[in-house]
Image: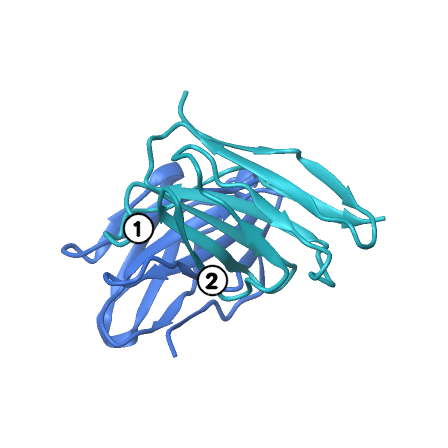
Amino acid sequence: DGGITQSPKYLFRKEGQNVTLSCEQNLNHDAMYWYRQDPGQGLRLIYYSQIVNDFQKGDIAEGYSVSREKKESFPLTVTSAQKNPTAFYLCASSIAGSSGQPQHFGDGTRLSIL
Amino acid sequence: AQSVTQPDIHITVSEGASLELRCNYSYGATPYLFWYVQSPGQGLQLLLKYFSGDTLVQGIKGFEAEFKRSQSSFNLRKPSVHWSDAAEYFCAALTGTASKLTFGTGTRLQVTL
């Protein structure tokens, strides 16, 4: 079945450490997105990519980095510059970025600080 | 600024009772509108979407939503709630020229037996 796979499900980060969250999709979608979810704040967009080798900052990109070398993959790195990284991270994809198509979500990665 | 508002943070209903979750949007033009549901520790599942045309939209799991342009609202309804409907519900909007979904802050639904 087609879908979005996020790994790992749980991740722990030490102070000063960079960690990378994986997101893979086999839906043949062009656009991919990363969201951060905190209690009571809904979902906030970190980065998005509408095509391979191109991506744009979302509303809260500081302290995060991404790459889009393959259509299927959109990994998110949480850098040591992100001072409050504890959150639930959701990856999503859609057929095309600007045609109003719904986004489909993975099951998320919960990141905590040791 | 473009925004989506879900005024109810938490709602409790009895099983079998009807449900209405409120959503209001603030956009210059009518956006694409979506309702998603999230179970604890899970991703979001699309319930339904409004693009244009009929103002009453049918979705999965017996949910429907009504678009009211005059009120800038897109409320989610279900005639009879089941205990398995307990979850968090998010309203979201997307404009035709943007690639970003704007989410409301969510409404947590609790169902009592």
In the picture, which chain is blue? B
Q: Position of residue A86 (x, y in %)?
A: 72, 54
Question: Hey, which quadrant is residue A3 in on the image?
Answer: top left
Q: Residue furthest right?
A: A114
Q: Classify mark 1: helix, strand or loop.
A: loop
Tell me whether marks 1 and 2 sit on the same chain: yes
What residue is at 70 percent from the left and 61 percent from the top?
A: A81
Q: Amino acid at mark 2?
A: Gly
Circle 1 residues within 10 Å: few <14, some 14–19, many ≥20: many
Q: Position of residue B64 (x, y in %)?
A: 32, 49
What residue is at 80 percent from the left and 54 percent from the top?
A: A16
In space, the residues marked 1 and 2 are separated at their CA atoms by 13 Å
The residue labelled by disc 1 is A97
Q: Position of residue B16 (x, y in %)?
A: 49, 44
- Residue A59 located left or right of residue B30: right
Q: Chain of mark 1?
A: A
Where is the N terminus of chain A found, in terms of image quarters? top left
Q: Amino acid at mark 1?
A: Gly
Q: Classify mark 2: helix, strand or loop.
A: loop
Q: Chain of mark 2?
A: A
Q: Residue furthest top?
A: A1
**Label tally:** 2
Can the viewer see residue B13 in this picture? no
- Check the rendered structure and report the hue given to chain A: cyan
